[in-house]
Structures are given as structure tokens and as C-alpha cells.
Amino acid sequence: MRMTITYHDPKGYYAVLGLLPGADLTAIKAAYRNRAKEVHPDRNPTEAARAEFQSLVEAYRVLKDVVYRAEYDATGVPPLIDDGDDYPATPFACSCCGKVTVQPRYVIFHQVKSFLVWAKLARVEGIFCRDCADRVAARASTLTWLWGWWSPPGLLLAPLALLRNLFGGTKPRDQNARMLIRQARAFLALDEVDLARALTEQAARFARLSVHSRQIERLRDETGRTGRRLKNRWAMWNTGVFFAQALPLVALPLVLGLAAMIAMKPWEKPVSTRAGINVLPAEIGDIRYVAVEDLKLRQAPVEGAPVLTLLDRFTSVQVVDVTSPEWAEVRAPSGVVGWVHRRALYAGTSAQHKQEWCASNTGTTPEAGEVLLRRATGEHRLLIHNDGRRDAVVKLKTPNGHTVASYFVPATHHIGVGGIPDGTFRIEFASGSQYSRACGIFVSSVQAALLPFTLTFHQISAVRMRAGASIPEVVLVTARDDPKQPQPLDIEQFTRDD
């Protein structure tokens, strides 16, 4: 049975919000917020504003509730906020098509829209007939499929919303029990006893409050406890919409599995790990990297020969001569040529091996203000401000590039450091995450920079020290328009100690 409902506004609830009868919940909430700001007693203390605010609150209390709003739209009589016996004489209408249906439901459908780093979860709710509910569910699920996956929160919220819509949306029990009881009363007033009895039994499936149980028992006494049953139109398999929504969800794990197989390529023949490792001998002109710490570069290919310099781990060298079976003559990055043990030289890219070695030797995380390196000491102090979102390592270097001191400054920390000797220093810093104590640098997201000025510390008299001489400050993260912007610095230059 279907008939069209005409909306009217006898109590002026829509008018006080500045809306036309039949406005949806989104428009009602927006209108209430805007109007409440203007007539709230805290902002407008006049009597007229106070009276209008009370009318506004009363109207919003009725219209924000989907069931109460449907009662008001259908009957023109403001419903009781608590469940009572003033049942309407006109059945409820569908929120979408405006027609009365024998088996309405108050349903909430969910949809998700992602914005790269966050996601918005929206609700589409109303009193629906089954046909309109299917259309609304399909639309909400389609929008979620299109826009819900493009953020980390969306990867969790989107499948939950799709599953809820697949199984008919969310049907709040108390509101549906109240609506079906009053719908049964409305049909009983129209002498549709069979329909009223069927609606009573449907309401019993939702009822959990004592007031609803009492009203259902009274309706059963008035309509009889046996009679014709209505076919449940809300069974999930009644329409093809359920299968249309289920098909993409079933196909999703299959598509993900296929993508994983394409990425892993299990059909390719795996490489055997039982074969021996072939170590290619060094050839003249090859670029190798040092695989041990503090490798001695000697003047001649014999133990005990004078040491020309020490080569750090992962330093790249060029092979010059390989006439000796145990020694190789190499040229260091500084240009010095000498001899090293051949077994200390590895082939490959030093940067990749260094990254892996540093990541596996991170050690404990340094504390705020911890001194990572100190080669000289003094009586001077310095304030360091790190307002960034990443930890930082700050180095004081001489103009020749020798590191005098190094400090750890966590993100959003402001620390004071001491023990700085006399002299002029340039300030270099690196920021990133996962600090490696073995390498003295961050493993991931590392960036380095040089502050565009130097600091000079010199001895001051005890009188000036007691008078409270000012302490210099450095800021690692500056505004875009700040003339003292840090200058980008190569990571290798930051780690190098000349």
C-alpha cells in the first residue's frame, strides 16, 4: 500500500530554523548551528532572543531525530520525546520517495571519503522503504569504493563501511521498535488489522525496552495473536543489490592475491643458496670499499711498514696494483697511494652496504642533549632549538672541518649544552629518524644542512661571567622568509671529519 505524504509545519519548527518542510538532517543541523550562534543568550541577552532560542532548541530536539521528524511530518503534531500512547493517525512515509510503505525501517548507511592522510566517515540515515534503501546503500557503497581507500585510516574504515552496507546498514533497535509500534497503531486506526498485527510482530524483533514490550502486548490484544503474516521484504537476498555489493568484496582478496603473485613471481626458478660464493679478485682500476674499521694504508706491502693514513669503514678506493697475492695498492679519496690487505676490500656499492650495516647497529636511542663526541672542552655554553618533527645531530666544526663536539637534540626539544672551548666554529646538523650509534648518522629520512654563520667563543673575565653574559642560541628550523635559512649539505660532507 502506497500513498504520498504532504509535508506541513503547523508548529513552525522548520520556519524557526529558516527551512522549508521536508528538509534533510544535514540542512537541519547546519541551520541550527548558524541560528544558535546569533540568538544564544550569551551573545544576545534580549528577551526576544531568549524566547527565539528556546523555540530553536525545541524545534531542533524534534527534527534532529529521524523518527520524531517523520511523526511530525506525517501528522503535524509534535511527538512526545518519551514513548507514550499518543500514536499518530497517519502512517510514516519514506524519507526518499515520500510514500507510505507497510514495512518501513530506520536505517543508517555508511560511506567513507579519504583525503590522503585522513578519512571522513559520513552517515546517510532516514526512514526508508526497501527499494529506496537499496538505492541509498548502493550509492553509499559506490562512493566508498571510489573515494574511501586513498588514506591509511580509509584502508580500515572503507571495508567496515562496505560490510555494514552489504548486510543492510545499521538499524537502531529502539528507534525501529518505536517506529513500527506507532506504524502499527496508524494502520489499526485505518482498520487494517492484518497489517497492524504483522507490524506488531516485526516491532517485537527490535523491542528491548520495557515500555515497548508493554505496548506490543497491548497491540497483540487489540489485533489478535494469529493471522496472515507479511513476507519480510528486508531479507538480504530479496533483491540483487546484496549480490551486487558482495561481488566486489569477494573479488577484492582475489585481486590482491593476484597482484602479490605478480610482484613475487613464484613461477620463476629460485636461486640456489647452497652454491659457493664466488669472490672476484680485484683488478687494476676497480673501485672497492673498505669492509673493516680503521684500515691501515701502508707505505709498502709488508706488515710493519709505515702507516700513511687510516681508512674508515665503507671508504671507496681505486685499485692501482695487484701484483702481490695478499696486498693491493690503492688510491684513497684524498689522493694518497698505499698498500692494504686485499681481504679488507669488498666489491659492490658501499652506500647500500653502509645503509644495511648502520641499520643493524643502531644501538640505544641517545638521550636529549647527549654528547655524542667531544675532542676539546671549555667553559662556554650554547642553546639549541629544534622545533622540527625529526631528531637532529648538531656538530660544532672548526673552519678546517674538524669536529670538536657533537650533540643529540630530539624533535621539538630546546636544550642547553656546555663544555665548549674557545674558538670559531661553523654549525652543521643532520635530521632524520632511527639514529645509528655505529655510524653516527640517521638511517632513514636523513638530511643535512649548514647554518649560514659561525660562532666565536673567547675567554671572558670572571666579573662578566658573574654579571650574566648572554648565551648564544641557534635555531635549526626557521621560517621561509628568515634570511638565516640553513644551506643544504651533502651527507658525506657532514659525516666527514677533515
Image (cartoon, helix red, strand yellow):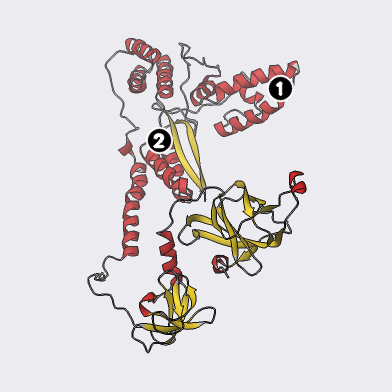
In the rendered structure, which amino acid carries the disc numbered 2?
Gly
Q: Position of residue 406 (x, y in %)?
A: 57, 57
Foreground label between 1 and 2: 1
**Relative to the observer, which residue lies in front, 443 or 68?**
443
Residue 177, above or below 247: above
Residue 419, above or below 230: below
Residue 189, above or below 237: above
Helix, strand, or loop for circle 1?
loop
Residue on which disc 1 sits:
42
Q: Quadrant of the C terminus?
A: bottom right
In the rendered structure, which amino acid carries the disc numbered 1?
Asp
Q: Give the label on residue 169, or none.
A: 2
Observer able to see residue 9? no
The extreme bottom residue here reads: 323
Apparent side of residue 388 relative to residue 174 in the rendered image (left or right)? right
Q: Position of residue 276 (x, y in %)?
A: 24, 75
